[in-house]
Image: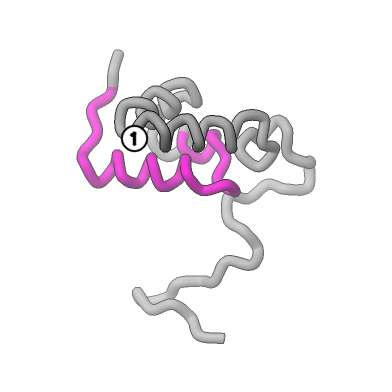
Amino acid sequence: MKKEFTTRELDRIIEMAWEDRTPFDAITFQFGISEQETIEIMRREMKPSSFRMWRKRVQGRSTKHAKLRSGDIDRFKCSRQKNISGNKISKR
């Protein structure tokens, strides 16, 4: 069964897939789609050259695949990422 996504959801899926530190498992958890379905969305929504560049970059990358990550990493968020509170980015 193929899922239908709003433009906003598609944008978020693409954004998450493009981020190096966001694992495919996070996309699966949030949107209920597999890694393969994510790849198909990226192929369909991106220019061919951009898709090839992205695919080459993420293939086998340990941060994109939870099984390849070290066991002590159990979060989707980078520890250096700033907290956002009240729609304002916290200042240093």
Q: Which residue is mark 1?
A: 46
Where is residue 49 shown, x and y percent of the image? 41, 33
- Residue situated in front as seen by the camera: 38 or 32: 38
Q: Quadrant of the N terminus?
A: top left
Where is residue 46 shown, x and y percent of the image? 34, 35
Q: Residue furthest bottom?
A: 92
Where is residue 24 shown, x and y percent of the image? 53, 35
Q: Tell me the element at label 1.
A: loop
In this rendering, the answer to whether 32 lies above or below 81 is above
Q: Residue furthest top?
A: 1
In this rendering, the answer to whether 67 lies above or below 7 is above
In magenta stretch: residue 23: yes
For the point 35% across and 46% down, which residue is it? 12
For the point 67% across and 30% down, which residue is it? 60
Among the 4 quarters of the image, the one containing residue 71:
top right
- Residue situated in front as seen by the camera: 57 or 19: 57
Q: Main secondary structure of the magenta part?
A: helix
- Left or right of residue 75, residue 69 in this image: right
In this rendering, the answer to whether 61 lies above or below 22 is above
Among the 4 quarters of the image, the one containing residue 32:
top left
In magenta stretch: residue 75: no
- Residue situated in front as seen by the camera: 53 or 60: 53
For the point 72% across and 48% down, which residue is it? 73
Where is residue 64 shown, x and y percent of the image? 61, 38
Q: Residue furthest front?
A: 49
- Left or right of residue 5, residue 59 in this image: right
Label 1 packing within 10 angstroms: few (<14), some (14-19), many (20+): few
**Label 1 is placed on what type of residue?**
Met
Among the 4 quarters of the image, the one containing residue 31:
top left
Q: Which residues are magenta?
A: 3-27
Q: Quadrant of the C terminus?
A: bottom right
In this rendering, the answer to whether 33 lies above or below 69 is above
